[in-house]
Image: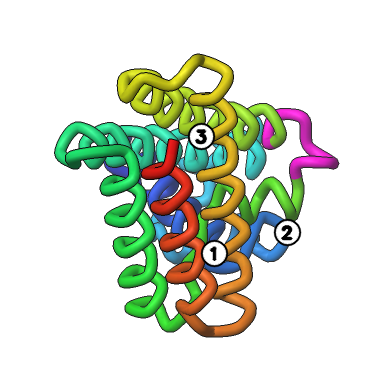
Amino acid sequence: MASDTRDRLIRTTSRLLRTQGYGTTGLNQIVAEAEAPKGSMYFHFPGGKEELAVAALDRFAERVGQALGRGLDGAGSVADAAVAFFDDEIARLESSGFVDGCPVATVALDASAAHDALAASTGGAFQRWTAILAEALEAEGRTPEAAHAGATVFLATFEGALLMAKAQRSTEPLATARDAIAALLAAT
């Protein structure tokens, strides 16, 4: 089934980008782990690895955006949602043995400077997530400027703490960042 093959390629690429980045992820590895014929990769993604990576990043960004929206809708406040978001990432990072990360951040660091399509995809993901958070902060009564600033600080802190947690193989940076962001969001 063609759509199943395309989906397997995207899921496999997303997983590999999360764990090893763009530069280390090879087409042969993607095809082998997705159990897909190599020709099908070029059939679905004639632009090759970069087009496939963009599809994987865009799907991941959409899923995170949906999860972020659900978390915000179900929480009593943005601060409460932030705590849950950080706690979910702490659990995910621990369960992966500190291997999994955010493929958007990984690719942004790894390859976006040399690949315009990857820069557009990673930049767009951060913009979408910022907009979702800013909208929720505005709904709590913040000005658009303050909401955008709060959303930007939230994401920058989260991604930086995740990077530190992976490097240190410790959830302490995420827990510390969680508490600081919750206090910041609750105070304004």
Question: Residue at label 1?
Answer: 162
Percent x, y for residue 137? 39, 27
In the image shown, does 75 or 71 lie closer to the viewer? Answer: 75
Which image quarter is the N terminus in? top left
Viewer-closest of 150 and 184: 184
Q: Residue at x 18, y 39 (%)?
A: 76
Range of the magenta residues?
A: 112-118
Could you tell me how far apart the alpha carbons at marks 2 and 1 are, in whole angstroms? 20 Å
Choose the circle earlier in sequence order: 2 or 1: 2
Query: Pointer 3: what residue?
Result: 151
Sequence-first tag of 3 and 1:
3
Horizontal placement of 185 versus 124: left or right?
Answer: left
How packed mark 1 is, by other alpha carbons closer than 10 Å (few <14, some 14-19, many 20 or more), is: many
Provide residue 95's location: percent of width, then percent of height.
33, 78
Image disc number at residue 23: 2
The reply to whether the C-beta atoms of the residues labelled 3 and 1 are less than 8 Å apart is: no
> Element type at marker 2?
helix
Nearer to us in this view, 116 or 90: 90
Locate the C terminus and report the quarter of the image it occupies.
Answer: top left
* Element at label 1: helix
Cα distance between the residues tagged 2 and 3: 29 Å
- Which residue sits at x=58%, y=18%? 145
Q: Amino acid at mark 1?
A: Leu
Q: Specify whether 43 is left or right of 75.
A: right
Relative to 7, residue 121 above or below: above
